[in-house]
Every structure is written in C-alpha cells, then in structure tokens.
Amino acid sequence: MRSARWLACSLSVLLSLLLAAAAPARSAPAEAFAYVTNQGDGVSVIDLETMKVVRTIAVGKDPRGLGITPDGRYLVAANQADADVSVVDIATAKTVHRIAVGKNAEFVRVGPDGRLAYVTYEPSSTGKPPAKGEGASNKAEEASEEEKPAEIAVIDLSKFEVAARLPASLETEGMDFSRDGRELVVANEGDNTVAVYDLASRRAIKKIDVSRYGNRPRGVKRSPDGSTFLVTLENSDNFLVLDSHYDVLKAVATGKGPYGVAFAPDGATVWIAAARSQRVEVLDAKSFAPMASIPVGKRCWHFSFTPDGTKALVACGRSDEVVVVDVAKHEPVATLTGFHEPWGIVTYPKSSGSLDTPTR
C-alpha cells in the first residue's frame, strides 16, 4: 500500500514537471518607449526605463501630432511644413510611407481598432497661433476670403492612402473618440465650436457653440467611463465639462493658456497643461477641485503618462526639454534635454495622455 502511494505521488510529480516543461515560457515585459515630435528635427525616442533618448527617427518637416497603432507596429506623424504624414515602421525606426494630406497637417488620432488614422489639416491657416483676443470673427473673415475651411483626412492604414475627408470648421485642434469608438469629438478654435462626427456615416451630427463660455477651444479628452468630455479654452483660461450627449454641464477655471488635457491612468485626477502659466495643474476628476500645480518649462502643450502610471512626461517646446513628473508626489523629478521645439508625445505600450486615450 505504501509502495503504491509512493508510486502514485511520484507519477503525479513527474506529470507536473512534464506539463511545466511543455508550457510556453512567459515572455519578458515589453520595453516601454516615449515618442516625441520635434518641430526642428524628427521624432525622439525615449527609453522609459533609463529616461534617455536612444534614437531619433527621420520624418518630414515640422512634425506635430502623432499616434501609434494599437499593435505598436506603426507610428503616424503629421508633418505641418510638408503637408503630409509619415508612417514609421517602429521595429526598424524607418519611414515606410509618406501620404499627402493638405496644408498645415497637425493633429493625429489613430482609431481604436488601428485601421484608420484621422489627421487634421488647415488650408486657410498661416500655421501660427493667433494673438490672444483674436476671436472667431477674425477667423471667419479670413475664411470668407480664402474659402478653405479645415478638414480631417481619414487615412486607411492597410492601403496607406486617404480614404475620405471630413469637412470641418476654420481651424481644427484636439480630437478624441467616444468610448464605443463610433464618434469623434473635435475642437474648432477658429469659430469657437466643438463638432461631433458619426464615423460610420462620416457626417457631423452635432455642433456646440462654446463662445458664451470662453474662447479658442483646443484640447479634448474623454473620461475613462465615457460619461463626460473635457474641452480646454486656451484664451479664456478655463475648460468645459460636457456630458455624454455633448451638452455643456459647466465651466471650470484654470491657470493661463490651458491646452493639453488628460485623465490620469487610474481616472482619479485630471491633468491640464496651463502653458502660459508654465504649470501642469492637477484636479480631482469628480469635483474638479485643484489638488496641485506643478512647475514645468515654456510652452508645454502636450504630455503623456508612462504605461506604468508612475510618471508623466511633459513636452516643453520653447525650453527644448521634456520634464518628468512623479505622479504620486506631483513634483518634477528630472528634466530631459537635447530636444528641438518638442511638440507632441505618446508612448508604447499606449498610455493616457493629451494625444492618446487607450481603449480599456
């Protein structure tokens, strides 16, 4: 009996060892990188473990917005001066396609399923920001003379060509998707509106006039649960809270020149780049009560959290640096230099930021 029990136990151990040997080994955690567009020169790649720039990817002239496909295969960068986008194979760090879009290509958002990229461009724009106090009437006069409102190019990333163009307003800015990925919300700084597009029909289904609340809508961000959208108003130093039907619930005051906006990865706080105050502000995501004001550099428009949620990287275009912020302590912990007018920033693996909203 004892011998039988010993034999059974031995066979059980042997079977477990054989199963363990046959099981595929767990892969090592993927490396994490941040990608930063430099208006002066290419896309800088930051190793997020060492916080050092490890390479620079050549793209077109004056790259601005950028996005990464969900599988991490391609990076799409808008080249404002070349009126096109570069599609980069991330594995080789080489540009594999250039796709003509239109004058002043600026913002990029890759759709949640990775099949399409949405790129804003502005034929009537000079490519330079208007002076503070320049309102929608000035832009309307400009557009009436040139009759070239902005558009959103829809790029098919399987064919690497423009599949459609969505008519927009005078100057398009930030974009974000509804939680189900069926709608696209776009800020139009030129006429102080926010437009909502149905992506199946590729038609605008709603337009919200925000001029009674402020001036120059720029950043757009959906809350993690999809119940609200935030829209920053750069020239009136505030942001709007919209409900899921895109009706305005309230306006909230900020520091000077709010632009990029994002919810922290845990959804508990909202971070806003108040560029003219040279601060990143942290607010409670439910009450919007101020929690912290973090000093950063000059003209810091966009930022991204790291995939592990412990740091935020802030691109500061006029001080040629990326400021690294400790998310828990709400304080800068490092300043990365060697950039040339950094504009946009995203990460892979994808993380929350002013230019990205990962699907959960």
Image (cartoon, helix red, strand yellow):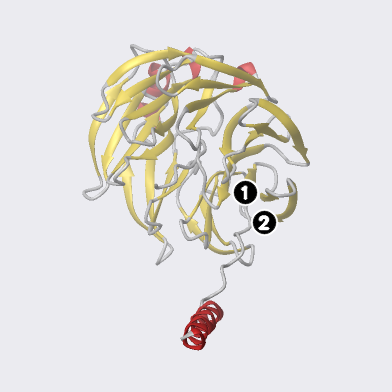
Q: Is residue 61 visible?
A: no
Q: Which residue is mark 2?
A: 57
Label 1–label 2 contact, CB within 8 A: yes
Compared across the picture, whether 323 is left or right of 136 comes to: right
Query: Of discs 1 and 2, which sits in the foreground?
Result: 1
Q: Which residue is mark 1?
A: 35
Please state the total of marks drawn on the protein image.
2
Residue furthest to the front in view is 1
Q: Quadrant of residue 209?
A: top left
| Residue at left offset 55%, top offset 14% | 255
Point out residue 115 in the picture as x, y percentages from the top left corner. 38, 59
Callout 2, which amino acid? Answer: Ile
| Residue at left offset 58%, top offset 35% | 303
| Residue at left offset 44%, top offset 17% | 288
| Residue at left offset 34%, top offset 25% | 193
Q: Is residue 239 visible?
A: yes
Q: Quadrant of residue 251?
A: top left
Callout 1, which amino acid? Answer: Tyr
